Image (cartoon, rainbow, N blue to C red):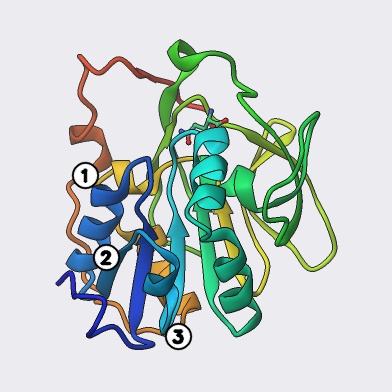
Amino acid sequence: MVTSVRGAAKHTIGVLDLQGDVAEHLDHLERLGIAAIRVKESSDLAHLAGLIIPGGESTCLARLLDIFGIKDCILHEFQRGLKLWGTCAGAILLAGKVVGEETFLPLIDIEIQRNAFGSQLDSFVSEALIPPVAQDPMPLTFIRAPKITRVGEGVDVLLRHDGYIAAAESPDVLVTVFHPELTPSLAFHRYFALKCGLTPSMEEEFPLIDSMWNSRSWTRYTRLGF
Ligand code: GLN
């Protein structure tokens, strides 16, 4: 159920709705029975348990967050207990260090490198077992993704492969360089809801991984062997 801002309380997760894949995050939260709202301006941030900063383009998102005056409000609410999850571009915005670039909202001690797999055409799908998040392997979608190259003290690695880190968390911030919202898996949204102190549905609703990949998709399927 996507609720109105007026009805929002601390049981609600917001999805930053300036640019990027917003509807898919809202859909996943709705399937878990979690109240969710679109965050378009700073007043939408009041009374949220968590905020998802979606994938898209980090430079574009950073500009829009500044223009609409939302950046400072996120910082303010974070200091008051708001949990954050950055997917892909969102993870870049939250990183304490961005290789060769300015940081934006450095709220988790990670180093991240933008576009680290190459161009848009080097995007790919894969799967991995991430025991803290789910018992079964889950599908992963990397779209012109960054790599997390280092984590600092107090940050736990959730998924590491081939010299880089694909998912990590501190007590208050979750970062994934891939897009769980673009797969049928609800596991990461459930994990974030639990981190926010909410009670998501525990039922699994996605089809078997092997039956879900579209062979005509422009992303290639790469079995990384995580
Ligand atoms: N390449 C984008 C950036 O650097 C991130 C891509 C994404 O979010 N899928 O911001």
Residue 197 numbered mark, or none? 3
Residue 180 numbered mark, or none? none
**Mark 3 residue crowding within 10 angstroms, few (<14) / some (14–19) / many (20+):** few
The image quarter containing residue 108 is bottom right
- The answer to which of 221 and 87 lies nearer the viewer is 87
Badge 2 marks a residue whose secondary structure is: helix
Residue 29 numbered mark, or none? 2
Disc 1 to disc 3, C-alpha distance = 29 Å
Q: Badges 2 and 1: C-beta atoms under 8 Å apart?
A: no
Q: Residue 60, position in %: x, y?
A: 50, 35
Disc 2 to disc 1, C-alpha distance = 20 Å
Q: Please, is residue 83 above or below residue 147 in the view?
A: below
Q: Please, is residue 23 above or below residue 48 in the view?
A: above
Amino acid tagged 3: Gly
Marked residue nearer the N-terminal end (2 or 1):
2
Residue beneath disc 1? 208
